[in-house]
Amino acid sequence: MTTTHAPARPIGKAAVGALGALAVSTGALESVVTPTLPLLQRELGMSPAEGALLSIVLLVTGALITPIAGTLGDRYGGKRVVVRLMAVVCAGGLVSALAPNLPVLLLGQVLQGAMVGALPLSFILVRAHLPAGESKVAIGVVSGLFVGGAMAGTLAAGPVAEGLSRHWMFVLPTFAVIGATVLVHRLMPHDPPRRPDGTGIDWPGLVLLSGTLVTLMLVLGLGADLVAQPLVLLGLVVLLAAFGTGWVAVERRAASPMVDLRMLTRPAVGKSCVLTFLICVGTSAATYLVPQLFAVPADAYGFGASATAIGFFLLPGALAASLAGPISGIGVRRLGSRAVVTAGVLLMAVGLLGLAAAHTEIWHLVVGKALVALANGLCVTAMVTRTATSVDLGDTGIATGLVLVTRVIGFAVGVQVTGAILTAGTPAGSEIPAESAFVAGFALAAAVTALSLLVVRTMSKGVKE
């Protein structure tokens, strides 16, 4: 017997405003670690590799939770799942605020990663309650407010951490998330489920992918320290291979796989994933290394910048990233995805090589980081657009999900590798990496980015293949 659900009730500006407030607060909470990472490393005694792990754990958790959140939203309704995800996020924010050491802070960031799955669910809610034309406007508003919240968090995290303490930079946005969640709960009507309860969740795939990513991060982050313990390193590599092989086997046989790997056999999707991985490896180097270089003492080769100053210096990059999406969309429509990606790759390679060659002035780093952020936005938006328009309508979510998961993996790998380079390049008895370690990190990222041009050459000129 089929159960029919009543259509969703229309919503007003107050409900959309509640979703916007949630987007602002979660964007702020997500962004506080990046400008304050050097401060957190000093206060918690972290190595560069451990700092790299801290900077990516939220993103990795988000990549894992997003497809599960979407399935649960279809099964139980978007509002119900959003409110519960936000409860997990708020718990994570409070754990991060109270964390006395790195392991507890990592736990808090893992819990906060649930916020990544909430933004797509917000879009589902808007589409469920508004006509097509109004929903597009509302989605754009919510997306813009999330970016605005991230910028506000980048600017405010430093002053709060230095004026109050590192604990308060998590507490304040967490309180804002709590308030916004209450508003969503009160103002947003329930949306009907869109799938029957029998819709399966790929729990084995989730567990195996989690094990694969965690083990990969351990191998990349601890590899330099484990060279003297080859059996331990070999054991981690074997474990990584076992997790990865098991995950591929499970996903190929699952009725409703978390990530449909068969989609990779389609040229447009497979090439987009390879390009996204390479581009995000390059992006991650600038994202991680530039704040570290700002914080190096001025009597060495850095600038001794405070967390407040670092947030201010990173703002142009955030602005460039926010502009990249619309620019890329216009470029893909007029010139095709290959032209946009080629321009983005060349721009990123120039920015990374410029950072490797010239980093003695603050403006060198500001301009270089902005170029990389703009290039990354151009490329990733073009890849997602290209992928979405090259598959059947029913496969859009699966295909674009593959690209977004690949984005997270590329970013995580790049950050961990550059963190390991800084750790290996830190002289014994010193807390400051050698300048050559930064140069090597930027140069390696530029080389990886340039390799992506080999894949770009095989792309068709249009969006579809």
Image (spheres, helix red, strand yellow):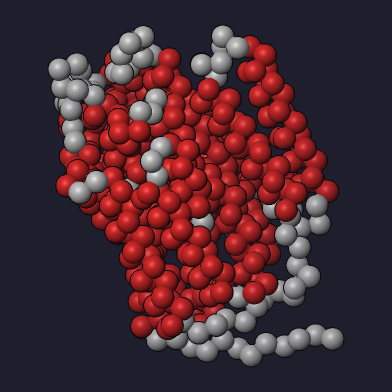
Rendered position, 313 above or below 69: above
Q: In the image, what residue occupies the spot 68% across and 72% down? A: 75
Residue 138 place in picture, x, y as percent: 40, 74
**Residue 380 location (% of width, % of height):** 47, 46
Identify the residue at image location x=54%, y=79%.
Answer: 128
> Up-down: is 37 above or below 121?
above
User: In the visual, does 139 lie left or right of 373?
Assistant: right
Q: Is residue 305 visible?
A: yes
Q: Is residue 331 visible?
A: no
Q: Which residue sits at x=56%, y=15%?
A: 226
Residue 438 shown left or right of residue 122 in the figure: left
Residue at 31% of width from left, 18% of height from top? 431
Q: Is residue 406 left or right of residue 415?
A: right
**269 versus 66 height, above or below:** above
Q: Closest to the observer: 447 or 240?
A: 240
Q: Quadrant of residue 458?
A: top right
Closer-to-camera residue (264/242) = 242
Q: Position of residue 278 (x, y in %)?
A: 52, 33
Q: Position of residue 345 (x, y in %)?
A: 43, 35
Closest to the observer: 3 or 328?
3
